[in-house]
Amino acid sequence: MKKDPVKMLSVAESQKKLEKFKVKFAKSKTAKTAAEAAKLSRQIGFPVAMKIISPDIMHKTEAGCIETNIKSETQASKVFRQIVSNALKANKSAKIHGVLIQEHVNGQEVIIGGKKDVQFGPVVLFGLGGIFVEAIKDYSIRIAPVTPAEAKEMIEEIRGRKLLEGMRGKEPANKNALKKLIVSVGKFISSEENFLELDLNPVIVNSKEAVVVDARIIYSS
Amino acid sequence: MFGKPSELKNFFSVKSVAVFGASRNARKVGHIILRNFVDSKFKGKIYPVNLKAKVILRQKCVKSLFEVNEEVDMAVIAIPARFVPDALEQCGKKGTRFVIIVSGGFAEIGNFELDSRIREITEKYKIQVIGPNCLGIFDAYTDFDTLFFPRYRLGRPDEGGISFISQSGAVGAAVIDLASREGYGFSKFISYGNALNVDETDLLEYLGSDKNTKVICMYIEGIKDGRRFMKVAEKVVKKKPVVVLKAGTTKASAKAVSSHTGSLAGSPEVYSAAFHQSGVIEATCLEDLFNFARTLESQPAPKGKRVQIITNGGGYGILSADACMKYGLELAQMKAETIEEIKKQVPDYAVVSNPLDLIGDADTQRYKIAIEGAMNDSNVDMIFVIILYQSPLVTPDIVDVITEAYDEMKKPIVAISTGGDFTEVHSTALQANGVTTFTYVKNAARALKMLFEHYRKR
């Protein structure tokens, strides 16, 4: 079967679209030089995470283009150079738009996804981050848009829901913020033309808020 | 489809019918369909269409519909696929707007050319088609059916409240046959096959407003327009429960779906979500579908999920308690005054708790006391009565005791009995009185959990 051509939005573009739906993203800035990386890291506040911005590097972790827990300006400059060099090693003709510097948010990792189903159109997916969705298929699905009650069900339905309730001394996650985020995503994907797929992965949820760390949206063009 | 789904009622109220493929050969599908019309209570005109025969089963044949002077309301087409376009043309020109195409050999085997040819003809003449590749319809109230199964092989159930929409003919036929043996009442059965222009959603909408239908069952392999289905289902479930069995939920079976009725199996999780969000009850197997439907048809709404188990066998009581817990029900805690009242009237070796064990020598009177106690106790939401008929002290009037309690329609009460022929006779008698009976407690627990969930959302 011939695959339809698709268009993938960058994190920044995704952020711009989703913020109109009151989706909150982790604070981030783009550095073009090592010196700028140091300066912007300080402005955001340590620790920070850094990640290459390039449409040509698909598997960023494997290529050594993501680094977390950066604690100083010196380290930030060093990591900047390392990430850019790793990117070019992975793909020497890679177009590099810079390095994303992002605040570090503590909390439970979750995933909110969306896809267009052949029979039912846009559907929302929710699951715990990391291995949970892929390895043990612990996720819930609803046809979009979803009501707040449906979003609540989605959260309560997963087997690993206890992890959101503050196990082993962790503070409980703000389920209300999570619920609102799921509802927003449902609204967003239902209103987008040519929508194919959305991946908010990870979203960090803590006792205060639910914050998107990385996002990807795909459209059929 | 072309008109409103309410027009589908015309399929069930025709006054004249033509049978393309009516044959003298008693083994041919067309012959059986004709015979079933002739043998039924159907009082209308029957026109066998056959090029050679003059008379079949005492019915005068015609070579084409054009030989018929009067109107022909409906046609059943059971001839090889390549001749179907011509038969449809005849229907179109004659003004026959309701057609059931039993024949297979279209989209389901990849013959899309023939499929689009018949589609064009039906669009040209605005013919509503059930099928192709289907069994057609059955109505227990009028005894009218187009099923090509002889009545001695496939029993037709009595009048009742369950209607069944089935993409597959075989699944539907088996359920009908089973229902007829077990004595469960039916309203309408529609096998719609490839859904050329009448699909599952049209049928759902139609049965939603059919007054004889109290519960709608569906067996589907795929849905054409998911959003439309949800919209219609949301409306219908406000009037009556809808139970769906979606087939093709595993990778292996999804492949078989496309070669069966030419539909896409789709993602099972998405289907489940859609059913859940539109208030449709999902059954995961044929057994559930059947059990859910008859439970919904006959039981009142429970206030909660606390079950009181009443038994004359201790082990069976424990198994029942396990099943209740496993499938998401709770064990009721009867009020102190109820327990005291029951204790006063039963021997002191009976265990008045939950399970309430009336002990192996329990007679009908002991059951009556226990059932009345549980029925009038507001801490009890539903009652499981386990009767092991093997005990010689259980007399046949237990059927009356349970039926009387059931007739109050105060809370769900089901009877569970595992056993042989003697047991079966009593269960059938209870079932005939409307009481839902089960052979295995697992099925009772699953059905009542479903009942609770269904009414909780109302």
Image: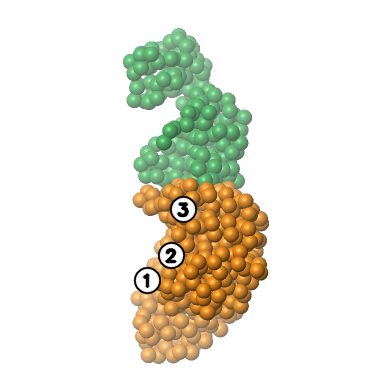
Chain colours: A green, B orange
Residue that appears at 40% across and 15% down: A94
Which residue is at the front of the view, A190 or A150? A190
Identified by mark 2, the residue type is Ala
Front: mark 2 or 3? 3
Place of residue A21 in the rendered image (x, y in percent of width and height, measured from the top left):
61, 33
Badge 3 is on which residue? Answer: B106
- Chain letter of disc 2 in the image: B
Q: Earlier in the sequence, mark 1 or mark 2?
A: 2
- Chain letter of disc 3 in the image: B
Residue B251 is tagged as: none
Residue that appears at 43% across and 69% down: B28
Badge 1 is on which residue? Answer: B319
Place of residue B267 in the rendered image (x, y in percent of width and height, measured from the top left):
45, 47
How far apart marks 1 and 2 lie (CA) works out to 34 Å
Which residue is at the front of the view, A183 or B158? B158
How far apart marks 2 and 3 lie (CA) works out to 18 Å
- Chain letter of disc 1 in the image: B
Place of residue B317 in the rendered image (x, y in percent of width and height, measured from the top left):
39, 75
Place of residue B206 in the rendered image (x, y in percent of width and height, measured from the top left):
62, 61
Which residue is at the front of the view, B78 or A171? B78
Q: Is B119 above or below relative to A110?
A: below
Q: Are marks 3 and 1 in contact (CB under 8 Å)?
A: no
Front: mark 3 or 1? 3
Identified by mark 3, the residue type is Phe
Badge 2 is on which residue? Answer: B170
